[in-house]
Each structure stands twice: as structure tokens, then as C-alpha cells.
Amino acid sequence: MRPFLKSRLRAHVERYSAEVELVAELDAEWTRLAAFLEEYGGLEQAVRRTYLAAADRPEQRSGIFADTLISLRKRLPETDDRTSLS
């Protein structure tokens, strides 16, 4: 799962970072993502909380959350170590 997340994060960072800042910004984003996931109990819990928050607002409801969760679930390793990014 880590290579998938890192590649998606890199694609995101490349959209707004200058090439000379890319490595530093990617490292900073990776650290922020790890802290966020640790705070929210891992990737699955973070997605679940986001979905539930959106479910409270009908105008925000979308199949994208379910599709994302399914996609991520397929990529998760069959271990209990789902929060570790390092």
C-alpha cells in the first residue's frame, strides 16, 4: 500500500511544487499524511470518517467515497499494519 500512496502523493505534490522543492515538499507531505493517519486511526478510518461527515450533508454525498474505499481496500496488505507509512 505504501508505494501506491507515495505515488499518488507525489503526483499531487508535483502539481503545485517547483522542481527544486519537490523532494522537500514530498517529504513534508508524507510526514503530514503519516501524522494525520495516526491521529485518525489509519487510512480506512480516515476515509470512513470523511464519508460519514459527508453523509450528514446530502449535497456532499457521492459514490466517490465508496469507490475510493473499495479501491484502497483492494490495495491494502492482508496485515494489521495498515497505519505505518515509514
Image (cartoon, rainbow, N blue to C red):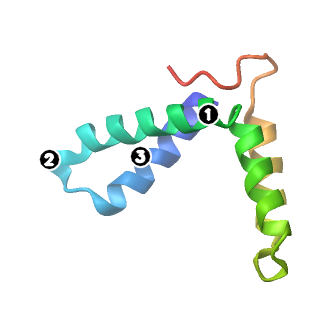
Image x and y of residue 53, in percent: 78, 62
State which mark lies toward you, 1 or 3: 1
Say what amino acid the circle numbered 1 marks. Glu
- Could you classify mark 3 by the number of other residues whose Cα lies within 10 Å: few (under 14), some (14-19), or many (20 or more)? some
Image x and y of residue 34, in percent: 52, 32
Say what amino acid the circle numbered 3 marks. Arg
Q: Residue at x 71, y 31 (%)?
A: 41
Marked residue nearer the N-terminal end (1 or 3): 3
83 left or right, relative to 75: left
The label number, if any, that marks residue 10 in the structure image: 3
Work out whether 47 lies above or below 34: below
The label number, if any, that marks residue 86 in the structure image: none
Which of 58/16 is in front? 58
Which of 76/40 is in front? 40
Determine the image quadrant of residue 65.
bottom right
- Could you classify mark 1 by the number of other residues whose Cα lies within 10 Å: few (under 14), some (14-19), or many (20 or more)? few
Determine the image quadrant of residue 54.
bottom right
Q: Confirm or deny contact between disc 2 and disc 3 (CB under 8 A).
A: no
The label number, if any, that marks residue 20 in the structure image: 2
Work out whether 27 lies above or below 25: above
Q: Which residue is mark 1?
A: 39
| Cα gap from disc 2 to disc 1, whole angstroms | 30 Å
Mark 1 residue element: helix
Q: Residue at x 78, y 17 (%)?
A: 80
Marked residue nearer the N-terminal end (2 or 3): 3
Mark 2 residue element: helix
| Quadrant (top left/top right/bottom left/bottom right) for the N terminus | top right
Work out whether 77 lies above or below 39: above
Image x and y of residue 68, in percent: 75, 54
